[in-house]
Amino acid sequence: MQSQRKNPFIAVLVYVTHVEGGYARPRYSEDIALIYASSEEEARAVAESSGRGDEISYANEYGESVEWTFLGVADVRSALYETLDENITLYSRSFYDLAQYKELFSISSLRAERSP
């Protein structure tokens, strides 16, 4: 049995960070990850699993609870080049307005965040 060829895909994963106390507004971020998969559907499943695995809660230097929560996969596309290493974040940036982000990129697949 011959295994299917794994192709490189780029996935955009979206997260939100909440800090206990409510004085800081939620901060949103997106990570651009390289994933090798046999299909776009498989790449999306790998991205979803990775995003859920990245979720974390910890106490910051002030003893406040910080939660980093995965909201969903915004996009998956075939990579332009095949010479990059697997499972690394290629680019990351943060933003404050999730509604504007969804509108800007016409993304309806992200789950709504829960109130802190």
Image: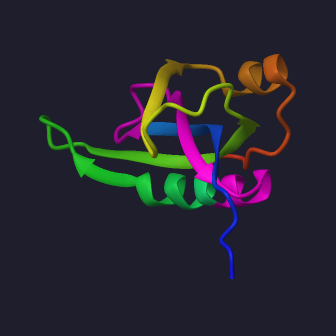
Q: Residue furthest bottom?
A: 1
**Whole-percent x, y for residue 4 in the image:** 70, 65
Q: Residue furthest left?
A: 61
**Whole-percent x, y for residue 99 in the image:** 75, 26
How many numbered discs, if any? 0
What's the colour scheme?
rainbow
Which is more toward the observer, 98 or 2?
2
Using the rendered image of the protein, determine whether residue 115 is visible from the camera's viewpoint.
no
Of the 4 image quadrants, the one containing the N terminus is bottom right
22 to the left or right of 57: right
63 up-or-down from 22: above or below: below
Using the rendered image of the protein, determine whether residue 66 is visible from the camera's viewpoint.
yes
Which is more toward the observer, 45 or 81?
81
Q: Residue furthest front?
A: 1
Is 56 a magenta residue? no
Which is more toward the observer, 63 or 7?
7
**Whole-percent x, y for residue 65 in the image:** 28, 47
Q: Residue at x 44, y 34 (%)?
A: 89
Q: Residue at x 57, y 46 (%)?
A: 35
Which is more toward the observer, 106 or 44?
44
Q: Residue at x 73, y 36 (%)?
A: 78
**Whole-percent x, y for residue 87 in the image:** 45, 46
**Magenta-drawn segment:** 18-45
Q: Quadrant of residue 55?
A: bottom left
Q: Residue at x 49, y 19 (%)?
A: 93
72 to the left or right of 33: right
Is 24 a magenta residue? yes
44 up-or-down from 8: above or below: below
